[in-house]
Amino acid sequence: MKRFLQVLFWSLIPAAFIGPGTVTTAASAGARFGYGLLWALTFSTIATVVLQEASARVTVVSGRNLAEAIRDRFRGGATGLLVILLVLGAIVLGNAAYEAGNVLGAAAGAALGSPISSRAATALIVIVTFAVLWVGTPKVVTTVLAATVGVMGITFLVTAVMLAPPVGEVLRGSLVPSAPTGSGLLLLGLVGTTVVPYNLFLGSAAARGQNLREIRFGLTVAVVLGGLISMAILVAGTGLRGTFSYEAVSAMLSGRLGGWAGAMFAWGLFAAGFSSAITAPLAAAVTAGSLFEDGSGRWHARGPRYRAVWMGVLAVGAAFGLAGVPPIPAIILAQALNGVVLPFAAVFLLVVVNDRALMGDDGINRPATNVVMSAVVAATLVLGVSGVLKAAASAFGGTPTEGRILATAGGIAGVLLVPLLLWVRRARARGMEHRTAGTASRGEAAPAPKPRLPDR
């Protein structure tokens, strides 16, 4: 029962990353390339487990959540102010963009599966989300999220199984990397829609007071189940032909499996948007509170400052929904912003978990974990630079090919990785230098390194 409750609690992570953006990106990938891009979801699921474990470990080992660790690590001077503004702006503004897509996607699902209008659905979603966040207790929030993720997971998994996809092709697509012509940016999009930056701050804050071994079990199971749901969405999109739209996916499923399948897709889309509509404002408030809390308690979960942040993020989603903005373009824009924000969060996390002065000998990353995290950071850098290049080309009227965008982004990311890895190396040595200097000043021998924790 204890392990089940851990999985239930950590379902807040898949609840956050499986939103309308995942439905749009994964279903589009299935429609265009069949099962060939499933391996990108395998990679991004593993990457999510690695990054979320690292962010939770920061809290358990150091006693500070990720936002607090960044604040303390880069405290003081223009650099410290710039880092705090960067994190705050990226997470809060990024979450506001996410919230617009979440509310619009949830409303689209509700309108697709019922006679209710999208504006009426938006109003209802905002009211219920407001009520859940206002109550604000972990038990209420996690119960609502777990129930929503359960409905969403059953919906998409049953739909995928009923389509009877060829098992061999599914396994090959899940395990054997391939990059069909024209799939590069979509591959990065699948990574970006699963490795969500605000989840790193949300998961780190949620880990406070918990046992690391139990966190690893609950987190891993919850994220893997979330990855399987994302794969099921991609499988459901393989039968679609022509221009992607939610209506087209629903009609395709209804035609192949019966009307119930179209209705299940609609309610799965609603559940994906609704669960993410709760987590995005919550993560923004948690991050802002962690950065600005000064011990006075003015940023507690029921205080006016904390509530003002999540209300502002929720208000952006409500404004977009009530204005009748088309959901798919807004969701694509939010995904693009995620691509720009994600590298910053991943880079800061990589530096923090390699800071020996903060994490100690037992808490810092092992070399194997650093290899995986570095690969994820490299992918996020390519994703972010690609988004910036596409935006710049569009602004200046250029039409570069996908190949040129990816090649340029890869070159820039490679150049950025060199100083980053040197930064990580200095962070790993920082605590050792402090310890050596301290013991030398007292005329003592440097202490032998502590043995690593058994569950590391």
Image (spheres, rainbow, N blue to C red):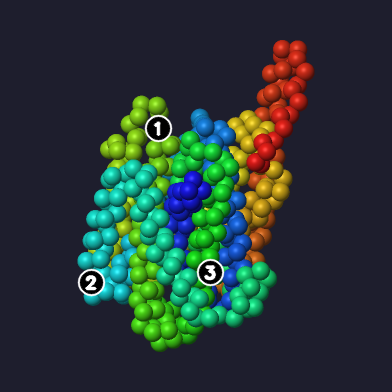
Q: Where is residue 417 in the image (x, y as percent from the top left)?
A: 66, 51
Disc marking residue 179:
none
Label 2 Cα crowd, 10 Å radius (few <14 / some 14-19 / many 20+): some
Q: Where is residue 246 in the image (x, y as percent from the top left)?
A: 38, 76
Can residue 176 be spotted in the picture? yes
Report the side of 450 relative to 77 (left or right).
right
Please tell me how many numbered marks the rendered image carries: 3
- Return the residue at label 3: 231
Q: In which quarter of the image is the C terminus?
A: top right
The image quarter in which residue 153 lies: bottom left
Report the side of 104 relative to 7 (left or right).
left
Per the model, the C-alpha gap separating discs 2 and 3 is 29 Å
Q: Earlier in the sequence, mark 2 or mark 1?
A: 2
Q: Are marks 2 and 3 in contact (CB under 8 Å)?
A: no
Q: Where is residue 300 in the image (x, y as percent from the top left)?
A: 34, 35
Q: Earlier in the sequence, mark 2 or mark 3?
A: 2
Q: Are marks 2 and 1 in contact (CB under 8 Å)?
A: no
Q: Where is residue 427 in the image (x, y as percent from the top left)?
A: 66, 36
Q: Say which amino acid is labelled 1.
A: Glu
Q: Which residue is drawn at 45% across and 75% down?
A: 159
Disc marking residue 116:
2
Q: Say which amino acid is labelled 2.
A: Ile
- Return the residue at label 1: 293
Q: Residue furthest bottom?
A: 255
Report the side of 90 relative to 178 (left or right).
left
The image quarter in which residue 120 lies: bottom left
Can residue 31 be spotted in the picture? no
